[in-house]
Amino acid sequence: MKLVIAVVQDQDSNRLSNALTKGNFRATKLASTGGFLRAGNTTFLIGTEDQLVPKVLELIKDNCRSREQMVAPVSPMGGNADSYIPYPVEVEVGGATVFIMPIEQFHHF
């Protein structure tokens, strides 16, 4: 048995949740916040049998896409902020970060 932890951007959360439900996978959704952009994410905890991990990964890949987004950089800590001009920067956001962990025991009560 494996635990699949998928951190996805909020924009992809509902689409992935619906796909997991249609695929008969149970998932727990947790609200989370990314450290880089401080934007909302959703973390999915998905317990599944080893042989079904590729199907879960396929659903995540098909429903979570990366996209370009303009962000204003955070002002520098220390130094002279008078000369700092925060020009928006285009960065790639979205997609999914996935961790797969072995599970020793699983109980459902």
Image (cartoon, rainbow, N blue to C red):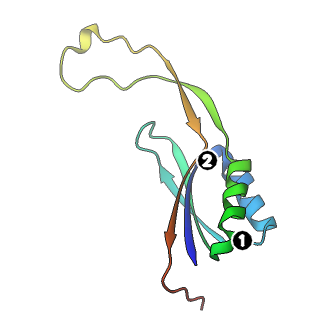
- Count the marks: 2
Is 68 or 101 nearer to us in this picture? 101
Front residue of 101 and 73: 101
User: Is 3 left, or right, of 48 in this rendering?
Assistant: left
* Residue 44 figure quarter: bottom right
Q: Label 2 is placed on what type of residue?
A: Asp
Q: Distance between the residues labelled 1 and 2?
A: 19 Å
Q: Where is residue 106 in the image (x, y as percent from the top left)?
A: 55, 85
Numbered badge on residue 10: 2
Mark sitting earlier along the chain (1/2): 2
The residue singled out by tag 1 in the image is 25
Q: In this view, does 82 lie to the left or right of 64?
A: left
Q: Is residue 51 left or right of residue 100?
A: right
Q: Which of 14 and 22 is in front in this view?
A: 22
Which three-letter amino acid code belongs to the residue tagged 1? Phe
Residue pictured at 66% horizontal, 58% vertical: 57
Residue depth check, mark 1 versus mark 2: number of the one nearer the observer: 1
Rendered view: 98 above or below 105: above
Against 56, residue 10 (above or below) is above
SS at badge 1 = loop
State the image coordinates of residue 15 (x, y, percent, origin top left): 74, 52
Q: Residue at x 79, y 67 (%)?
A: 23
